[in-house]
Image: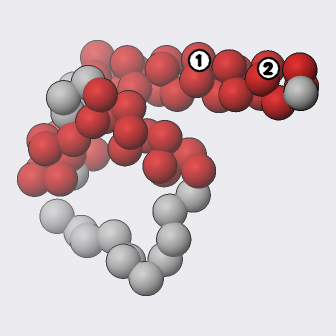
Amino acid sequence: MKKKNKNKPMTEDEKLKYEIASELGLLEKVEKEGWKSLTAKETGRIGGLMTKRKKEITKQQTQN
């Protein structure tokens, strides 16, 4: 597995992706085997939740 450059800060999207993977109980799998080890269903779940969360964040920012 290719290691991520630890000196490069994570983007907000990457932070959100890791946060959601953790919430779904997939973070350990990702850390051991990489993102490519996830099934299409798992990847889709993460992507869907990221989209939903981003919309909520945008909505909150426009209301403030």
Q: Is residue 17 above or below residue 4?
A: above
Q: Relative to residue 60, is residue 32 drawn left or right?
A: left
Q: Residue 63, percent across and down?
A: 89, 20
Q: Quadrant of the N terminus?
A: bottom left
Q: Residue at x 29, y 28 (%)?
A: 23
Is residue 42 visible to us here? Answer: yes
Q: Residue 33, percent across and down?
A: 12, 50
Residue 59's tag is 2
Q: Residue at x 20, y 33 (%)?
A: 26
Residue 52's tag is 1
Q: Quadrant of the C terminus?
A: top right
Colour basis: secondary structure
Q: Residue at x 10, y 53 (%)?
A: 32
Element assignment for label 1? helix
Q: Is residue 64 above or below residue 12?
A: above
Q: Relative to residue 64, is residue 46 drawn left or right?
A: left
Kind of residue at badge 2: Lys
Return the residue nearer the eye: 53 or 32.
Answer: 53
Element assignment for label 2? helix
